[in-house]
Amino acid sequence: MIELSHVSKTYPGTIAPAVGDLSLAVPAGETVVLVGPSGCGKTTTLKMINRLIEPTSGTITVGGRNVFDIAAHDLRREIGYVIQQIGLFPHRTIADNIATVPRLLGWDKQRTTRRVAELTELVDLDEEMLPRYPAELSGGQRQRVGVARALAADPPVLLMDEPFGAVDPIVRARLQDELVDLQARLRKTIVLVTHDIDEAIKLGDRVAILDVGGVLEQYAPPADLLRDPANEFVADFLGSDRGIKRLSLIPVSSVELIDGPVLGQGASRDDAEAMMRRFEIDWVAVGGDGTLAGWLGRDDLAGRDDISGITLRPFRTRLDVTDSLKEALDAVISSHTAVAAVFERDRYVGMITTEAISREIVQ
Amino acid sequence: MMLLLAQVESQPFFRWDWVFRNLDDIWDRTVEHVMLTLIAVTVGFVISLGLSLVAIRWRRAYSPITWATGIMYTIPSLALFAFLLPITGLSVLTAEIGLVSYTLLILIRNIVAGVDGVPPDVLESATGMGYTARRRFLEIELPLALPVIIAGIRIASVTVIGLVTVTALIGFGGYGFFILRGLGLFYSSIGTTQIIVGTVLSVTLAVSVDLGLAATERALTPWARKKVPA
């Protein structure tokens, strides 16, 4: 969808190129994140795609067309653009801000109004915001408007330059989640620049790690980067907790679950004690046939012949097979029983242990 | 001397009867004052906008432009009219050349400062979404510069309203006509009455125009007074 071929940019008055001989292909419908330290040319690279910066050499195509064959302003109207400071027009209402590109394209009023309403819903913005001015909105709301405005003319490509850099961490996490949801529905071709490796891992289908001077060190899906960094620079950049970071990308369903110490409702005290011995633990779970009623401890067995009359304690952490191993690890280490029960919707499917998780890290 | 003072005291200080006898004349001079001001500020604004565009496009031109208009601003108005008389005579043109030349520095500075004050992220997003340079200037930069530009128009208008009185020396003057004539009759109450009428009306006009423009600014820039409460 977007193809950079031997692109370089040397700013006037400098000798070292900001970007030197960069080739990169961004497949249609994917989110590619450009990440790297400051001076790595990630923003320069992004801005060369919509010609806010003209490359010194090389070619760039978007949707098969050479960007230099199209008038810059026409090209930009087909490419959504979101920047860190958002750059909403302070003198225009939110509705008018969102309608910016449709207006530039000369859409009629009815079509524009309909589209603005659609986008308001898409980015989960309160309709009451539409007649207001940007100064009246919070940072998070402004950022949503920025995204709505970029999507207004339904461009196939979206360029985002540190889009969540100016909001606080809580709002940032929420906006990131929203972008993931939005992208799952819209399947745009997104190029996003960030200096935050965690954001890159969270948002990117592929991540391009750049070093100073626009040198592409590695370009791969996040899970591959974390499992197999190409060199020391990439490994350093990913951080020492790369194993744990990788866990956030792997679903619980991909590891082997154990059946766990589960007894049927009618089991005897001897069955329970045998089970505890076998697993070297002092508790057993009670359930069966896809259900899990709860668990009981060794103390609960005192003075009983079977387990039927014992009040069971509930499993406080329940995992779904779609949850990540990072969430599983958190559940396991913070649970009393050192395992976490895993469900597929409401059906009990097994238990996950720290061993299973660490096996995945070492792999 | 004693006699003169006694004579002044014997008459009322302000002659309302003169005012009522000359209402038509006062109205004509009001129209003249307003027209001279309106033409000066309008022409001054058009010239200033042109020169500002040049200064914004070619930054190196800004310094010579402010230098030249700054010199115009410092020439005493009396001297300027004296200098122009042999060339343009006792004409409206002479009056307006003088008046316009005092608006340029103020207006150019405010237009350029206003446009420069537009936040860079707004410009970047405008260009990034496909605004052409011309359309961006007209639809984004100019409206956002409006508060500063109107501030300039307010100062220029007030300045011109004061200066119009000086054009009485070349046969115009608006309210200045009464002031000049009053000065010639200084020891009579008819004279002082005319000085007071000319001065008070000129000041009143300046204040009204200033307030009117301030209200216009508020009406044109509704976004500027909306701020998030929390």
Image (cartoon, grey):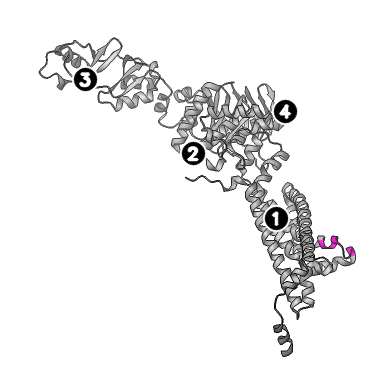
Gap between marks 1 and 3 measured at Cα: 81 Å
Q: Is residue B161 above or below residue A117?
A: below
Q: Residue at x 21, y 20 (%)?
A: A312
Q: Nearer the viewer, residue A278 or A104?
A: A104
Query: Which mark is on residue A312?
Result: 3
Main SS, magenta residues: helix
Labels 1 & 2 near each other (Cβ < 8 A) = no
Q: Earlier in the sequence, mark 2 or mark 4?
A: 4
Q: Quadrant of the C terminus of chain A?
A: top left
Same chain under badges 2 and 3? The reply is yes
Q: Which residue is label 4 attached to?
A: A70
Helix, strand or loop at label 2? It is loop
Q: Are marks 2 and 4 on the same chain?
A: yes
Give the label on residue B153, or none: 1
**Toward which corner of the image does residue B192 lie, by quadrant?**
bottom right
Which sits in the foreground, B223 or A334?
Answer: B223
Q: Amino acid at mark 4?
A: Ile
Q: Amino acid at mark 2?
A: Val
Q: Secondary structure at mark 1?
A: helix
Which residue in the rendered view is the most extreme toward the left? A303
User: Few, some or many C-alpha atoms within 10 Å of disc 2 (few <14, some 14-19, many ≥20)?
Assistant: some
